[in-house]
């Protein structure tokens, strides 16, 4: 059986992690898959090992180029310098692991790992980048660096949207591939709660305590919904209490560093929203929370990929997202879902109210449209054949 290596950038379970799991599942019957993954947090490693996947843990929590929409912007910031040192420390280990890997193809699961390109090519590997983030504008040095690595050292760059694909210029068209994120539709069941006779409605948010994914925007919107005719509750998927570090220095730093969880709790207290929010744990199986949802909201504060859009499509649950251009190919306002003015809690509240008040026949048409769109672009069954074709094409080039 041929071997393939996948390199991941984060030990927790997020959207990129779920996508990695889908890739592994799609390839493991045809390839001997090895995954390199940060040791902390260990959620991804535990999940992959439970699937019988060969996992090599990397003893560094972060070794990325943090320049993307929602990440760092400044090339010489304190965080960027710290990550540079992490990459420098991690590089010898990656060189050793890649040198010992007997397969020909290595894929990184994020453009933030593009710095590994020179290492991979030095070891004469065929290279794939699964590009999951939206680029910052070209005038940022970090963007220039990442695009340089991708152009020079990667045989294929795989995008999850046409928008992001079009933003990568001066790279051979035939080497740019769009493979949409997939959802196993069998896991998702149509929710009927939007049509329930009772006045209680549940808004589902899967983004955790993330400024990028809009935690503060959403919680602020609840104060504008207090006078609604509906009894609206927010299901907030994210651990309620901040992790208590055993390191004294980390405890001191937490007092001074801006913390989204602390800010969210402050908003809740100031607006007396304690009874309006139900906190749930982060999970690799978000479909279990969809059964309770009347509406799903993804209020990202910057352009970001929105996996809940497709999951909502298969569940036939209304989805509300921020109005960014990068997601227009997936959500058209009042056609396949709903958008609101980015970073505007009051407008988000108004759209939530509008959806709850919408006539059933009109809303059902929108839900049907999103289901069709999700089936056309995100059905899981076709992922394996697309990935295998991608890898075989690259392997074929090696022998030319």
Image (spheres, rainbow, N blue to C red):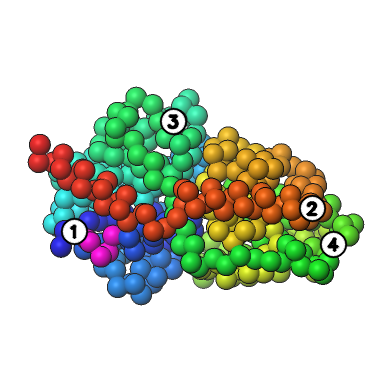
Whether pointer 3 and pointer 2 mark residues with C-beta atoms closer than 8 Å, the reply is: no
Residue 102 occupies quadrant: bottom left
Residue 58 appearing in the image: no
x, y (%) of residue 395? 17, 45
Above/below status of 51 relative to 176: below
Q: Secondary structure at mark 2?
A: loop
Disc ID at residue 230: 4
Residues at discs 1 and 3 in contact (Cβ within 8 Å): no
Q: Quadrant where the C terminus lies?
A: top left
Of 52 and 247, nearer the camera is 52
- Of marks 2 and 1, the one in the foreground: 2
Identity of the residue drawn at 63% across and 46% down: 336
Q: Residues within 10 Å of mark 4 (few under 14, many from 20)?
A: some
Question: In the image, 123: left or right of 11?
Answer: left
Numbered badge on residue 166: 3
For the record, the magenta segment spans 27-31
Main secondary structure of the magenta stretch: loop
Kindly give the residue lying farthest to the bottom in the view shown. 50
Which residue corresponds to mark 1?
3
Q: What is the spatial separation of the Cα atoms under label 3 and label 2, in whole angstroms? A: 38 Å
């Amino acid at each position: 059986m041929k071997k393939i290596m996948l390199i991941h950038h984060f030990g927790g379970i997020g959207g990129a992690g779920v996508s990695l799991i889908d890739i592994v599942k799609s390839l493991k019957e045809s390839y001997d898959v090895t995954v390199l993954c940060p040791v902390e947090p260990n959620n991804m490693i535990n999940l992959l090992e439970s699937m019988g996947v060969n996992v090599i843990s990397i003893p560094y929590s972060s070794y990325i180029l943090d320049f993307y929409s929602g990440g760092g912007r400044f090339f010489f910031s304190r965080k960027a310098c710290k990550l540079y040192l992490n990459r420098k420390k991690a590089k010898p280990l990656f060189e050793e692991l890649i040198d010992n890997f007997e397969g020909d193809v290595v894929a990184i699961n994020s453009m933030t790992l593009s710095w590994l390109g020179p290492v991979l090519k030095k070891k004469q590997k065929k290279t794939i980048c699964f590009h999951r983030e939206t680029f910052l504008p070209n005038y940022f040095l970090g963007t220039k660096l990442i695009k340089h690595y991708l152009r020079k050292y990667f045989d294929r760059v795989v995008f999850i949207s046409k928008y992001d694909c079009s933003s990568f210029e001066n790279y051979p068209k035939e080497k740019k591939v769009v493979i949409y994120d997939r959802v196993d539709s069998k896991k998702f069941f149509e929710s009927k709660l939007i049509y329930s006779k009772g006045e209680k409605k549940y808004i589902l948010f899967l983004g955790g305590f993330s400024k990028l994914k809009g935690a503060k925007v959403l919680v602020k919107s609840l104060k504008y919904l207090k006078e609604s005719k509906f009894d609206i509750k927010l299901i907030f998927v994210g651990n309620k209490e901040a992790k208590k570090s055993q390191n004294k220095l980390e405890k001191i730093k937490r007092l001074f560093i801006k913390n989204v969880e602390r800010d969210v709790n402050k908003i809740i207290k100031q607006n007396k929203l304690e009874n309006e929010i139900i906190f749930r744990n982060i999970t690799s199986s978000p479909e279990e929370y969809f059964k309770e949802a009347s509406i799903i909201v993804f209020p990202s504060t910057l352009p970001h990929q929105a996996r809940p859009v497709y999951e909502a499509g298969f569940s036939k649950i209304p989805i509300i997202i921020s109005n960014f251009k990068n997601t227009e190919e997936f959500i058209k306002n009042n056609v396949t879902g709903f958008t609101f003015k980015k970073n505007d809690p009051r407008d988000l509240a108004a759209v939530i109210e509008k959806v709850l008040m919408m006539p059933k026949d009109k809303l059902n048409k929108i839900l049907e449209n999103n289901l069709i769109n999700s089936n056309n672009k995100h059905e899981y069954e076709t992922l394996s054949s697309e990935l295998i074709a991608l890898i075989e094409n690259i392997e074929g080039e090696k022998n030319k």
